[in-house]
Amino acid sequence: MKLAQITWRLSSLGGRSEHGRELAVKRTLQAYYLSGKPPWDSGIPAPELVAAVEGPYALPPGPLPVPGC
């Protein structure tokens, strides 16, 4: 079964309640994450991040917070 089919089935289990929809979204995101190929991970760093690390105004070496969501 393809990931799209699995996520559709998981999302359809949520029903109409708010809690059910939240659970369906959680299950769908977990399925994408566990697949090893989540659609939000292009494998290409954002140009702004590259500029901050390698560009002319790059931050000096040292501690750096980890960027995230």
Image (cartoon, rainbow, N blue to C red):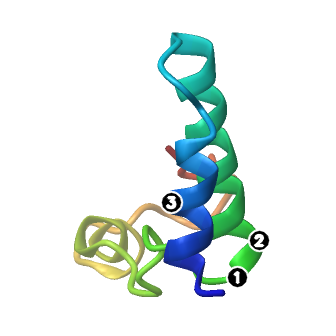
Q: Residues within 10 Å of mark 3 (few under 14, many from 20)?
A: few
- Considering depth in this image, is 1 or 55 the residue closer to the camera? 1
Q: Position of residue 64 (x, y in %)?
A: 62, 52
Q: Find residue 8 and name its label.
A: 3
Determine whether the residue tagged by mark 3 lies in a helix, strand or loop.
Answer: helix
Determine whether the residue tagged by mark 2 lies in a helix, strand or loop.
Answer: helix
- Would you name the residue on which mark 1 appears? 36
Q: Position of residue 40 (x, y in %)?
A: 43, 67
How many numbered marks, from 0 up?
Answer: 3
Q: Residues within 10 Å of mark 2 (few under 14, many from 20)?
A: few
In which image quadrant can residue 59 be found? bottom left
- Three-letter residue code for mark 2: Leu
Q: Position of residue 52 (x, y in %)?
A: 34, 65
Q: Find residue 19 and name its label.
A: none
Q: Residue at 62%, 14% (x, y): give it.
A: 19
Q: Residues within 10 Å of mark 1 (few under 14, many from 20)?
A: few
- Three-letter residue code for mark 3: Trp
Q: Earlier in the sequence, mark 3 or mark 1?
A: 3
Q: Are marks 1 and 2 in contact (CB under 8 Å)?
A: yes
Q: Is residue 32 left or right of residue 48?
A: right
- State the CA–CA distance, disc 1 to disc 2: 5 Å
- Considering depth in this image, is 54 or 37 the residue closer to the camera? 37
- Would you name the residue on which mark 2 appears? 34
- Considering depth in this image, is 17 or 60 the residue closer to the camera? 17
Q: Residue at 51%, 12% (x, y): give it.
A: 18
Label 3 vs label 1, nearer the camera? 3
Q: Quadrant of the N terminus?
A: bottom right
Does 39 appear above or below 37? above
Determine whether the residue tagged by mark 1 lies in a helix, strand or loop.
Answer: loop
Does 7 appear above or below 10? below
Q: Residue at 49%, 75% (x, y): give it.
A: 4
Q: Residue at 65%, 40% (x, y): give it.
A: 26
